Image (cartoon, rainbow, N blue to C red):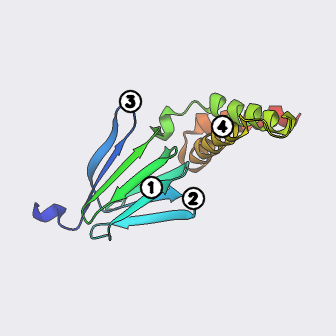
Amino acid sequence: MAEEQRHKTNLVVVTPYDEFFEGYIDSVTLPSHDGKVGVMAGHMPLVLAIFPGVATIKNGKEEKHFVLSEGYAEIAQHLTMVVCNSAEWPEDIDVKRAYQTLIDRTKKIKEAPKGTYKIKDWQEAINRAKARIHLIELCGSEEQKALLEKLRAKEDN
């Protein structure tokens, strides 16, 4: 291992469609069902269930945020492998689609008869939409934030 990488961990994030990210980093914070889990070089081995949410990569003074959907992470001393259904940078998020999914699936759950088998799928879609919207609130572009506010105002009326 090169000297500059000795205190870093290799992060690999893959989806069914591509390798989303690969590189040596200082740390990563991953969303799990029980909250956020921070990982640095030398972390004890762990398998972690990933819950839809915002992940943060730290490298020096630089921070990058992205959203993960459900999946899992295998963590070793110098490698963190995340396998998930989707991963997106803020600039790749379709704000209108995420917001509309949140509204539509919430409405479906409220109107569904008790015992509807699709409720779990709809709840998972809501969790993914909320994660995407949260990422936009944290570090989306001004245009994305303005569109989100416009959609919320329209829904309130």
Mark 3 and mark 1 lie on one chain; the one further toward the N terminus is 3
Mark 1 and mark 2 lie on one chain; the one further toward the N terminus is 2
**Which residue ends up furthest to the right in the rendered image?**
157
Horizontal and vertical percent for residue 19? 32, 37
> Separation of disc 2 and disc 4 at Cα?
17 Å
Q: Label 2 near label 1: C-beta < 8 Å?
A: no
Horizontal and vertical percent for residue 44? 32, 71
Q: Is residue 37 above or below residue 105?
A: below
Mark 2 and mark 4 lie on one chain; the one further toward the N terminus is 2
Horizontal and vertical percent for residue 101? 69, 32
Residue highlighted by disc 3: 17
Q: Label 1 near label 3: C-beta < 8 Å?
A: no
In the picture, the quarter occupied by the N terminus is: bottom left
Q: Nearer the viewer, mark 3 or mark 1?
A: 3
> Separation of disc 1 and disc 4 at Cα?
26 Å
Three-letter code, disc 2: His
